[in-house]
Every structure is written in structure tokens, then in C-alpha cells.
């Protein structure tokens, strides 16, 4: 039995269902046929919103970028925090977004969404999220809180560190030394007992980068 959708709701339902399918079994689980069956619509209706699987995955990734932007913007706009603290907390929030949404995060940077080229929707969403980071870096530089290098270059350094740390944590291929931050050597792969240690290491990593940028 086909489900009834109000105009404009079907696309949102398809994206939500696709994201759930990715969480359940990875990108390979998503096919246009399987998605249409799960939502209860014809494939013709599905193709009215997405021209192919790559287009669909790009739209799912775009939504994830929008959610990431929301987290970053909330911190950037928090005037109760000092600017450098906002930059620190935004970097931590980025990594935690990846840990909270591992399947969607891997999709955002995976080959599946660029098989036919990056969609304009995904490109715009990713740049919009990235602009939040550039904005707080520019504000820090304007107030002479961090070194005045090209803000895009500084943002790239933060992104490289946050993305690399996120992927290492998600793949369980990072170890933390006791002699660095007083916690046991461990392999982190989503084990509940390591959650506090994850956070200590994320903050330690961000602070290590900031130490080289903050002006005395």
C-alpha cells in the first residue's frame, strides 16, 4: 500500500529513510528500489526528486553538513564565550559530530558522493559549514587573539586536524599515551568505557594546535 504524502514531504521522507538505511548497513544497502519499497512509493515518484543514487547520497550528505553547520554556528554565536574558547569548542564539536554520526560523516567525505561529481547542493552545504570556522578565525584575528595568517590557511589546518582525528577515532586506529595526558594506552573504537578518554584526547589535540596560534 502506497503512503500518502503532502507536497514537499516526500523528499524529506526519502532522505530520512536513506540516512537510516546507511546507518543500518552502510551506503551499499541503499538502492533506489530498496528505498522506494521502504518509503512505500513508486520508483517513478522517487526519480522525481533524485535523478540517481549519487544524487540521493549527495542530498543526504548535504543534510549532514547542514546539521554540522548548526552545531558550529551555535557555538560561534555564543557571546558568553571568549573568541578563542569558541574556536576551541567548535573544533571539539566538529569531532564529536563525527563520533555521533559515524555513517553520515563517512558519507560526507566518501567516494560515493563524488562518483558523478559533487552535487551543487552538497557543495553549497559543505562550504556553508566551513564558513562558520573561517568566520570565528577571522574574528580571532581581528581581535589579535591568534596569529594573523591567511584565515583560509588557518582554517585548513584546523579542518585537517579535526578531520584526521575524527577518522582515526572512528576507525579505532589511534592510541593515547599515558605519559602525554595521564590516561592509559588504548585503542578507541566506540567502546563506551573510553568515552571520557576520547573527550580528553580531543580537547588535548585542539589545545595543542591553539597553543601555537594564540598570541601572548
Image (cartoon, grey):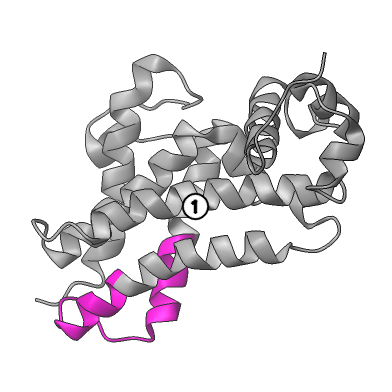
Residue 94, x across and y down, in percent: 40, 49
Residue 170, x across and y down, in percent: 54, 34
Q: Pointer 1: residues within 10 angstroms few (<14), some, or many (20+)? A: some
Q: How many marks?
A: 1
Residue 167, x across and y down, in percent: 55, 43
Q: Is residue 113 visible?
A: yes
Q: Quadrant of residue 2?
A: top right
Up the image or down, 108 lies above or below 76; here it is: above
Q: What residue do we see at 27% from left, 41% from top?
A: 180
- Quick check: 108 left or right of 130? right
Q: Secondary structure at mark 1?
A: helix
Q: What residue do we see at 76% from left, 34% from top?
A: 27
Where does the N terminus fall, quadrant-wise?
A: top right
Up the image or down, 135 lies above or below 60; here it is: below
From the image, tell me which residue sits under label 1: 66
Q: What residue do we see at 65% from left, 52% from top?
A: 109
- Quick check: 42 left or right of 5? right
Boundaries of the magenta span: 136-159
Where does the C terminus fall, quadrant-wise?
A: bottom left
Q: Is residue 207 visible?
A: no
Residue situated in front as seen by the camera: 98 or 166: 98
Q: What residue do we see at 22% from left, 32% from top?
A: 182
Q: Quadrant of residue 76?
A: bottom left
Residue situated in front as seen by the camera: 119 or 7: 7
Amino acid at each position: 500500500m502506497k503512503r500518502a504524502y503532502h507536497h514537499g514531504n516526500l523528499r524529506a521522507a526519502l532522505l530520512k529513510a536513506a540516512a537510516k538505511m546507511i546507518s543500518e548497513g552502510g551506503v551499499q544497502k541503499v538502492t533506489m528500489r530498496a528505498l522506494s519499497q521502504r518509503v512505500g512509493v513508486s520508483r517513478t515518484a522517487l526519480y522525481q526528486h533524485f535523478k540517481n543514487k549519487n544524487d540521493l547520497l549527495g542530498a543526504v550528505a548535504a543534510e549532514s553538513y547542514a546539521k554540522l553547520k548548526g552545531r558550529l554556528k551555535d557555538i560561534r554565536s555564543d557571546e558568553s564565550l571568549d573568541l578563542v574558547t569558541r574556536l576551541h569548542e567548535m573544533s571539539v564539536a566538529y569531532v564529536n559530530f563525527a563520533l555521533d554520526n559515524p555513517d553520515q560523516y563517512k558519507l560526507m567525505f566518501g567516494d560515493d558522493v563524488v562518483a558523478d561529481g559533487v552535487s551543487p547542493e552538497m557543495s553549497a552545504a559543505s562550504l556553508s559549514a566551513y564558513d562558520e570556522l573561517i568566520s570565528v578565525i577571522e574574528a580571532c584575528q581581528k581581535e589579535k587573539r591568534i596569529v594573523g595568517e591567511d584565515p583560509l590557511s588557518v582554517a585548513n589546518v584546523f579542518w585537517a586536524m579535526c578531520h584526521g582525528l575524527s577518522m582515526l577515532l572512528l576507525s579505532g586506529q589511534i592510541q593515547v599515551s599515558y605519559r602525554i595526558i595521564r590516561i592509559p594506552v588504548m585503542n578507541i573504537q566506540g567502546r563506551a568505557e573510553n568515552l571520557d578518554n576520547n573527550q580528553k584526547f580531543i580537547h588535548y589535540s585542539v589545545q595543542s594546535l591553539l597553543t601555537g596560534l594564540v598570541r601572548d
